[in-house]
Image: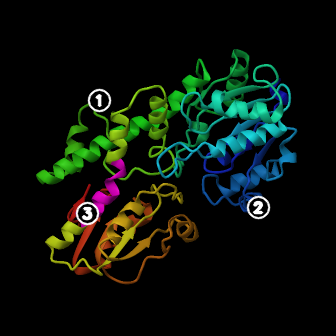
Amino acid sequence: MNMDQIRICVIGLGYVGLPLARLFSTKYPTVGFDMNQARVDALMQGCDATLEVDNGLLQEAIKNGFRCTTDIEEIRDCNFYVVAVPTPVDKNNNPDLSPLYGASTTVGKVISKGDIVVYESTVYPGVTEDDCVPVVEKTSGLKLNVDFFAGYSPERINPGDKLHTVEKIKKVTSGSTPEAADIIDSVYASVIQAGTHKASSIKVAEAAKVIENSQRDINIAFVNELSKIFNKMGIDTREVLEAAATKWNFLPFKPGLVGGHCIGVDPYYLAQCAQRHGYNPEIILAGRRMNDGMGEYVASETVKLMLKKGIQVLKSHVLIMGFTFKENCPDVRNTKVIDIYNSLKEYSVDITVYDPWANPSIAKREYGIDIVNELPQRKFDTIVLAVAHEAFLGVNIQKLCLDNHVIFDVKGILDKNIIDGRL
């Protein structure tokens, strides 16, 4: 396959797929495919609801030939397919590969001899070759490494991060044959400013991705546990971490909620992979248990502070500031703020959730709760600052509180002289 003959299709136009497709379109004829017609319509009007691609850049890309579609016939003439669909876990934290199976079926319907399919979705080692490729083969009637080729290049998108954008993050690539690996690496290298790292095999690339976020999860779990310990000792965890960070090789992790579609999910993929091979992981799942319990812990500590101040908890008015899984981003997938909300609800308190970034209709659909985008004009018994949106830095928190109140700062961004508790 010659580089000047490459025609790219990116399947899945979410937080990962759209920025990648837009980037590819600067170098190659590119089509974005998604099953959501409303999403495609909005993109073709030059509007990205995820805010990952600047509308000006998107409109420029469309003007230069980039298009999005739900019509499978419009991607049939492509020859380099990139799958960037979500890989969530189910309610039992088991990996849900159904989006990958669906995307692989789509690829199988349009792939031709000599074509390449590259997977970017987070998986555990073996999924690309043992689960996805067989679906492509069965649907297409073609054979891997005979009629078509495959690769894996793990996504490294950081939602809301305008500094580390897709082209500025080094990309790991791999292929099902040495020749395919070379082509795949060349395609990515032609648009990724930070360069690429060609892994020796697809499984190595898959494993590299799944441990990246597992490592962060474990490190955050450690400082979350430290936060619980130091809280009992009456020591400020943030001050401890600040002092420890003066050592040159100290890793500067901070306690907090761990949600989103990566750090809170990927460790379960690695754990299941380990269990399939007869090993029961201990540290990985211990980290998950610690981090998954932090929302309930924040709620419990908040209630304790209210009781110490003589605040009537029953029917008290609580404001939760922030609902997205991270700051300055509209993404509410796997947000752990919902755990704070649900735990506080057990005490029969009246809760208002304020987030200027989150879409209220999505929050209602996904979590069944009402949130507001405008700062409430009333006073509260308790405020929980759960997300470090820049918009919150200009808010006079104390003016939102009754005289006797509690402020719990989950993110550690407020003046410690005005708060009652923080992680």
Q: In the depicted view, which residue is nearer to us: 11 or 267? A: 267
Badge 1 density bin: few <14, some 14–19, many ≥20, Cα 10 Å: few
**CA distance for labels 3 and 1:** 34 Å
Q: How many marks?
A: 3
Query: To which residue does mark 1 refer?
Result: 249
> Residue 303 colored magenta?
no
Q: Vertically, is 386 above or below 29?
A: below
Sequence-wise, the earlier of marks 3 and 2 is 2
- Farthest residue, direction bottom: 378
Q: Quadrant of residue 404?
A: bottom left
Query: To which residue does mark 3 refer?
Result: 300
The answer to whether the residue labelled 1 contacts the one labelled 2, judged by CB atoms less than 8 Å apart, is no
Sequence-wise, the earlier of marks 3 and 1 is 1
Q: Vertically, is 416 above or below 373?
A: above
The answer to whether the residue labelled 3 contacts the one labelled 2, judged by CB atoms less than 8 Å apart, is no
Q: Quadrant of residue 127?
A: top right
Q: Secondary structure at mark 1?
A: loop
| Percent of width and height locating residue 312 | 21, 80
| Percent of width and height locating residue 313 | 24, 77
Query: What segment is highlighted magenta in the picture?
Result: 291-302
Q: Residue at x 29, y 64 (%)?
A: 299
The disc placed on residue 41 is 2
